Amino acid sequence: MGGSQFRFRHFTIRQDRCAMKVSTDSVILGCLTDPPPRGRILDVGTGTGLLALMMAFRGGESVDALEIEPEAAAQAAENVDASGMGGRIHVITGDFREFRPEVPYRLIISNPPYFPPGVAASSRARDLSRSTAALTHRDLLLQSSALLEKGGMLSLCVPATAVPALENTLTVTDLLISRRVAVRSVPAKPCYLEVLQLLKAPGKTVLPIREELCIRDSSGAYSEEYRRLAGATYADEWSGNRTTTGKEGA
């Protein structure tokens, strides 16, 4: 979703200094993730601060927003301050792999880097945000398993093609898939994204809930299911022909 800013119903995201802009994938992840009524939340790779803001406005009482790129972290902090949520959200500049909080989290949410090292990017900051060289999915799972309290949850979205490798990594963690939502851009295309919710439940067995979401119908307009999911998030009324960009269908 390009441009220097993007206006949501409850807040505005300024993104001119962030390498990675607001994306449809992040909106879907934020809408599918219910913040816990109590307990601490961590947004890993907050970028513009979108997911942290979504969690706070949906009822999260304490959100840490971690970002490795200093300029993006500064803009996320400005977005948080402008939203009036500065009392609930704390923006931290740092590397998740080296992050050592004193208290565990009830929820960790992340729209992590998608692309392998070497995929062309327009800037070092964009490469840092996009590339799994900065944070692999394995790094994310192992560190999240360590930082979550028992019964806590990791909610993330990954390319559908990355799920088998991710499932292999889960065997060396205390995390189990409790919900998976396969996302299509349009009905005729295969699922390009999966939203996964992973429960920290050592020694237990969980049968995951499986769902599907199609963003647009065959005419190219937003589908009714996407309207129901995300309609309250956007600032304007739904016309059915709203144009977006971002990682949708990538």
Image: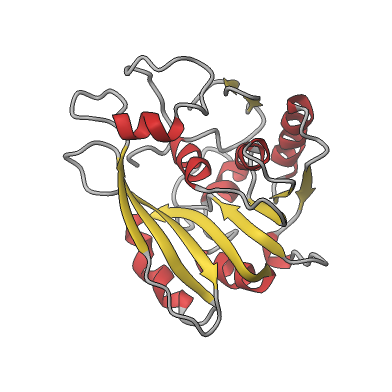
Front residue (pair 130, 195): 195
Front residue (pair 166, 63): 63
x and y percentages locating residue 173 in the rendered image: 54, 78
Which residue lies at the image location 42% right of the left edge and 73% below the top edge?
A: 206
x and y percentages locating residue 85 in the rendered image: 76, 33
- Seen in the picture, residue 180 relative to 5 is either above or below; the reply is below
In which image quadrant can residue 229 be found?
top left
In which image quadrant can residue 90 be found?
top right
x and y percentages locating residue 82 in the rendered image: 76, 25
Which residue lies at the image location 68% right of the left edge and 40% below the top edge?
A: 56
- Seen in the picture, residue 151 relative to 125 is either above or below; the reply is below
Is 250 left, or right, of 139 in this rendering? left
Is 199 left, or right, of 69 in this rendering? left
Front residue (pair 16, 180): 180
Is 15 left, or right, of 215 in this rendering? right
- Seen in the picture, residue 45 relative to 85 is either above or below; the reply is below
- Seen in the picture, residue 219 relative to 65 is either above or below; the reply is above
x and y percentages locating residue 157 in the rendered image: 46, 52
Is 217 left, or right, of 249 in this rendering? left
Which residue lies at the image location 72% right of the left edge and 57% below the top edge?
A: 39
Which residue lies at the image location 53% right of the left edge and 68% below the top edge?
A: 199
Front residue (pair 16, 53): 53
Q: Report the quarter where the C terminus lies.
A: top left
How are the residues colored?
secondary structure
